[in-house]
Amino acid sequence: MTSVFDKLAAAKAAPRQTLDVTISLNRDLSEEREALLAELEAAKESNDDRMSAPTAASQVQERLDVILDAEMDTLIDLRFTRLPGDAWTKITQLCPPNPDSLLDMHYRYSMVDACKLAAKFVGTDGTVYGHVVEDDELVTLTVQRKTKTNPDPTDEWEDIFSRISGPEFTTIVDTLYALNVHGPAERMAELKKRSASLTA
């Protein structure tokens, strides 16, 4: 069996687990897209276009494709890295639970608020744990503290959170929960189970 020092050295050398999430920064194109989809359906149902001319449906589809291309340009990839255990614990201590959330009442802290803080967490050594991925490069977002000299600080993570849909935000929370809570707990339970079976 390896010594505790060997185990610690191996743990320090190993890269931290990461997970990626793709989200869309809303540009309020949904109403226009829905109107075009309805128009496309009506054009297909009427089916009275001449064979020699572009069909009404094809013309609407072209306009719809422009909208869809514009929406494709709203996609961004986020990469989150598992926080050190002590950092995650400190974050949870800053986040009182929502009494209406069963998950919060189980863990005794607000999972949503903890995950928002985890997304923008930067370690004391300068390590950043949440990034935007652009062309295989990791981009660090700006998060400033509110001070007397900076009463309106820049917080690009909050800008992202406020411009995505509810399901997308839930995906971010689920990803950070999986990285920092569920995944490690499942791994530890499996290791204990295996250890017990080997020593039985």
Image: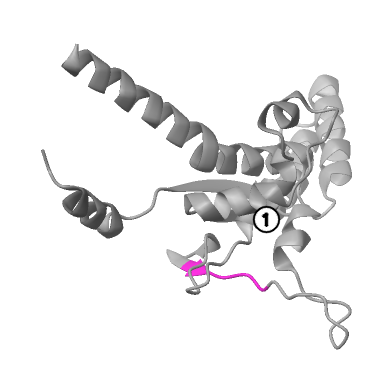
Question: Looking at the image, is 49 positioned above or below residue 139?
Answer: above
Residue beneath the point at 82% across and 49% down: 29
Could you say which is closer to the camera, residue 18 or residue 133?
18
For numbered disc 1, what is the local secondary structure?
Answer: helix
Q: Quadrant of residue 170?
A: top right
Could you say which is closer to the camera, residue 162 or residue 90?
90
Residue beneath the point at 28% across and 52% down: 11
Question: Looking at the image, is 45 positioned above or below residue 114?
Answer: above
Q: Position of residue 199 (x, y in %)?
A: 18, 17
Which quadrant holds the C terminus? top left
Q: Would you say 134 lies left or right of 148 here? A: left
In the rendered image, is residue 152 in sight?
A: yes
Residue beneath the point at 82% across and 35% down: 98
Q: Which residue is mark 1?
A: 117
In the rendered image, is residue 72 in sight?
A: no
Q: Position of residue 55 (x, y in %)?
A: 76, 36
Instruction: Tell me how the rendering is colored.
Output: one colour
Q: Quadrant of residue 112?
A: top right
How many numbered badges does the structure rendering display? 1
Q: Position of residue 106 (x, y in %)?
A: 69, 26
Q: Would you say 188 lies left or right of 120 here? A: left
Magenta part of the chain: 138-142
Which quadrant holds the N terminus? top left
Q: For the residue marked with disc 1, what is the amino acid?
A: Leu
Q: Residue furthest left?
A: 1
Q: Name the magenta segment's main secondary structure.
A: loop
